[in-house]
Image (cartoon, grey):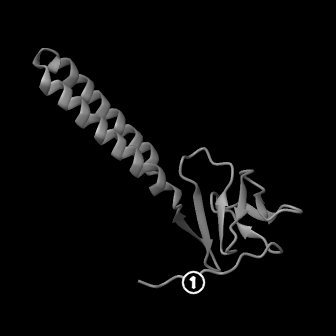
């Protein structure tokens, strides 16, 4: 596997858009950001100067790309791990508490079991949503 070197991004140059192949990124005046002429997305240059982040993202996880000199290399944002792990731990703790309550009272055990299954399905749904 070849190691990719990352190059500094210059605000004086144009780059291909990481979202679309035909779009071109050009610098937005008086900012450290780029705008695409096709998809109208705005990308902010990180302080390190070798990566950009999609500013107007509807995803929970921000999209980050690094410039290799010829193309963009997609990276995962560190924000993903910070959001998903606490969410999954909270969901697991909630299911354990609900199962403990169900085991103490057998009369409502079936109802609580159904609620637990629905809660687990909701936790999986959140996990799939934040995974991207």
96, above or below 69, in the image: above
Which quadrant of the structure image shows residue 63?
A: bottom right
Q: Is residue 94 left or right of residue 57?
A: left
- The residue lying furthest to the front in this view is 104
Q: Which residue is nearer to you in this view: 86 or 117?
A: 86
Which quadrant of the structure image shows residue 29?
A: bottom right
- Tell me the residue at 33%/39% (across/down): 91
- Tell me the residue at 51%/61% (across/down): 78
- Quadrant of the rendering where the N terminus is positioned: bottom left
- The residue lying furthest to the top in this view is 107
Element under disc 1: loop
How many marks can you see?
1
- Tell me the residue at 72%/61% (across/down): 44
Q: Which residue is nearer to you in this view: 74 or 81?
A: 81
- Tell me the residue at 77%/76% (across/down): 10
- The residue lying furthest to the left in this view is 106
Q: Is residue 22 left or right of residue 131?
A: right
- Pinpoint residue 114: horizontal percent, then vertical percent: 22, 23
- Pinpoint residue 74: horizontal percent, then vertical percent: 54, 66
- Pinpoint residue 124: horizontal percent, then vertical percent: 34, 40
Q: Residues within 10 Å of mark 1 (few under 14, many from 20)?
A: few
Q: Is residue 31 left or right of residue 72?
A: right
Which quadrant of the structure image shows residue 116?
A: top left
121, above or below 11, in the image: above
Residue of label 1:
5
113, above or below 8, in the image: above
- Pinpoint residue 13: horizontal percent, then vertical percent: 80, 74
């Amino acid at each position: 596997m070849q190691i990719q070197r990352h190059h500094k991004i210059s605000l004086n140059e144009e780059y291909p858009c990481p979202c679309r192949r035909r779009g071109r990124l050009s610098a937005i005046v008086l900012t450290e950001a780029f705008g695409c002429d096709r998809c109208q997305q705005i990308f902010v240059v990180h302080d390190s100067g070798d990566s950009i982040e999609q500013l107007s993202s509807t995803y929970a996880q921000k999209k980050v790309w690094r410039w290799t000199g010829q193309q963009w290399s997609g990276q995962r944002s560190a924000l993903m791990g910070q959001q998903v792990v606490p969410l999954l731990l909270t969901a697991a703790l909630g299911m354990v508490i609900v199962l403990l309550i169900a085991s103490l009272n057998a009369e409502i055990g079936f109802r609580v079991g159904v609620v637990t299954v629905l809660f687990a399905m909701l936790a999986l749904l959140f996990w799939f949503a934040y995974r991207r």
